[in-house]
Amino acid sequence: MQVTKKKYYDYLVPFALGLIFATILLIPQFQIHIGVKLSDTQFHFNRFYDVYEQFKNHNFSYFQMNYGFGQTGRVVNAVYGPFFSYILGFLLFITGSWFKFQVLITYIVFIIGSYGMYRLSLKLKTSRITAIVVTLLFLTTGYMSSWTNSNSFSTWGAALVPYVLIQAINLVDNDKGRFKWTSLGATMAIVAQVHLLSTVLCVLALVPFFIYSLYQSKNKAVLCINLGKAIAVFLVLTANVWGAFLLLYSTNHMAPTFDYPLSSTAITVGVVSVWNTILDSILVIFFVQLCYVLTNFKESKLNNLFTIEGFIFLLLSSQLFPWSFIETSFPVLKSSFQFPNRLTIIAYPLLFSAIGITITKLSEKYDSRITNLSRLLIVGIIISNLSANYIFTTHRVKENPINEATVQEFVNNNISKVPEYLPIQKYMGANEIQNNGLNDLNADLNKKFNKKVLSNGRLKLSWQSKKREVIVLPIFIYHQSKLIFNNKRLNPNLTAIGMPFVQSEPGRNTAILSFNTPIWFTILLFISLIGWILIIVLKLLDLFLPNFKLDKFNLSQKKVGSKL
């Protein structure tokens, strides 16, 4: 009975923490009771709105987006968290309003992050009180606390990192090369289906743990084989992701994201802890943690690993690192990486977890009053951090409310700020793309074209012309696109950013745009879907059937692995 109570406690506590903190940061939005348009709202709402309309109209198109981004036939969701886009688009369909949707997913991301950080702390054998304190610190710092004032999707990556670090502990916490390779592969696949750049950062975070595990393992061959199995699981579950990249990037010149000066997007000390700033009080406890590890280096291998790697990522994310030199030497990073502060999604959970280990060690070595004092000091930092974040969020929300008219405006027209994934005809930077017609697209969208979505994910444009003339259609043509103009297949000339020229005839004209998906990608898509169904079914059997053991199928080694 006692075990059962603890089990429920370990589910309810992180759920309650996430619920409470999400509610606090949502208060400014509850007060105005409408949605808000934040830094990344426009881009992501267009992605989810497209899926929302697909469910609403029962007309699905995996690649060509016929509803979002001004109904221009762009490809975005297929290469940006595809399955997760459909999940969130479905939630938007259920809630029916942008305000309700924003509230719902805010609760979801905080609960996911809270539960992951709490379980990670318990995995490191900290007490439940310490796990609560560390979880609160995590929820009020960096990208987690930035969701309600930015809608940055790196927040979702940050919420998932603790689950990846649990797998990292499984890598280290054995000497026979055995670990739950299905869990590792599936966890990384979830991150890839949500936010691809976070997947890259998580792989970098796992490398030191694997190297250490390989060094200490008594059976290196088994370790490498199991890692290969984890990679195979990952590739199966993400076949739709890497398949889409292979399809599009091998046959199209895909537009890059905006260039950002890396030196100005690295973190610095500020009065609030959000995506690009950090409180000086948090830096102090990080420094104290480093000093403790350096003077107690033989005490805990996990504390050493978490602290040292966390400080490396923190240094790389900060303005102390020579990012000016890096961006001069490797300018491609300004568009491909953009924000060094993204590295904090790895640094913070590593360092906060390490602080939890240190508090636990202090409680074992010294009087409990020292432990309680440490917790009390951190709670003070948490309160200060939460207060500053609340004030900052309140300011952003009051400045950026959106009503239904505003929503329709940035769904239908305002897409000039998002050049990503356009089928450009030669390499151009984001600013050059805007100067080559993207800025002028908004006027054309409502100028004279009527748009209708047909069955099988096709997009129809119709318009009236007074004379025979060459015009540019406000749609985008990829290598896989098919354009039927006035009932004839057309291979048109394209603008620099992939919009087709057509010779309009006097009277009514029509153009139908579709996307030809090759059979090999359809196969990959079904492989990925079947893989996820199989993983979910086996996990449910493992949870609810006591006599069912995944290791009978050689899917895990529960006898030697750590139970999550």
Image (cartoon, helix red, strand yellow):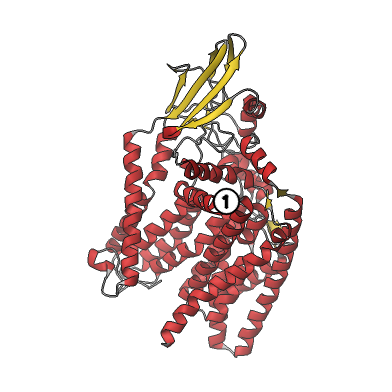
Image point (62%, 70%), residue name: 20
Which is nearer the eye, 46 or 118? 46
Image point (68%, 70%), residue name: 284
Q: How crowded is mark 1: few (under 14 residues within 10 Å), some or many (20 or more)?
A: few
Residue 262 appears anywhere in the view: yes
Classify residue 37 as left or right of residue 493.
Answer: right
Classify residue 542 as left or right of residue 411.
Answer: left
Q: Residue 406 falls in which quadrant of the image?
A: top right
The percent coordinates of residue 192 (x first, y second) are 45, 51
Q: In this view, does 414 lie above or below 162?
A: above
The percent coordinates of residue 521 (x first, y second) are 35, 38
Quadrant where the image shows the N terminus:
bottom left
Residue farthest along the bottom direction in this orientation: 367
For mark 1, what is the residue? 96
Image point (58%, 89%), residue name: 366
Which is nearer the eye, 203 or 216? 203
Classify residue 312 as left or right of residue 213.
Answer: right
Q: What residue type is labelled 1?
A: Gly
The percent coordinates of residue 475 (x first, y second) are 54, 27
Residue farthest along the left direction in this orientation: 552
Quadrant where the image shows the C terminus:
bottom left
Label tally: 1
The percent coordinates of residue 226 (x first, y second) are 30, 60
Residue 294 appears anywhere in the view: no
Q: Is residue 451 above or below residue 382?
A: above
Q: Is residue 317 above or below residue 15?
A: above
Which is nearer the eye, 156 or 347? 156
Q: Residue 480 falls in which quadrant of the image?
A: top left
Describe the element under mark 1 as helix, strand or loop. loop
